[in-house]
Image (cartoon, rainbow, N blue to C red):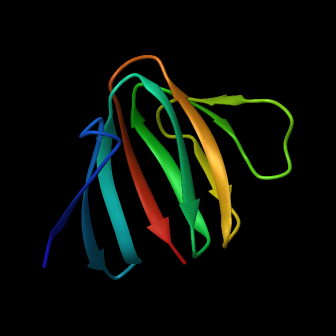
Amino acid sequence: MLKTNTYFDNNVVSIGFENQDGPATVGVMEPGEYEFGTAKTEYMTVISGSISARLPGEDHFMNYTPNQTFIIAPNSKFQVKITEQTAYLCLYK
């Protein structure tokens, strides 16, 4: 079953699903700055656009472009900066 999630006044919208890879979301972010938290290890892959992310324990932002993945440790928070509409896929392990 699909589950729609909206965050930050509808500036981030995702659809949750589950398949052989486990639970996942696919979504789109509008330009802006956001902070997210995760309970599980999260593998975030850029589909289109770009994500500038500051991961837990890091002092600076790193830029990720299509087909690049970054990993967020469980029970942590991370910040992202988005400069154009950006699509992403998150897998939760």
Q: Quadrant of residue 31?
A: top left
Specify the farthest residue to the top: 83
Q: Residue furthest front?
A: 9
Please give the count of numbered marks on the rendered protein.
0
Residue at image position (26%, 67%) is 16
77 vs 41: above or below: above
7 versus 84 height, above or below: below
Q: Position of residue 62 (x, y in %)?
A: 71, 30
* Identity of the residue drawn at 46% across and 66% down: 91
Residue, x 41% and y 25% (percent of image)?
49
Q: Is residue 2 above or below residue 90?
A: below
Expressed as whole percent of the image width and height from the top left, the position of residue 27 reads 29, 47
Q: Residue 70, position in %: x, y?
A: 64, 49
Q: Is residue 53 left or right of residue 26?
A: right
Image quadrant containing the N terminus:
bottom left
Residue beneath the point at 56% across and 40% down: 68
Placement of the C terminus among the 4 image quadrants: bottom right
- Quadrant in the picture for residue 15: bottom left
Q: 21 and 59: which one is in front?
A: 59
Residue 56, percent from left and from top = 77, 52
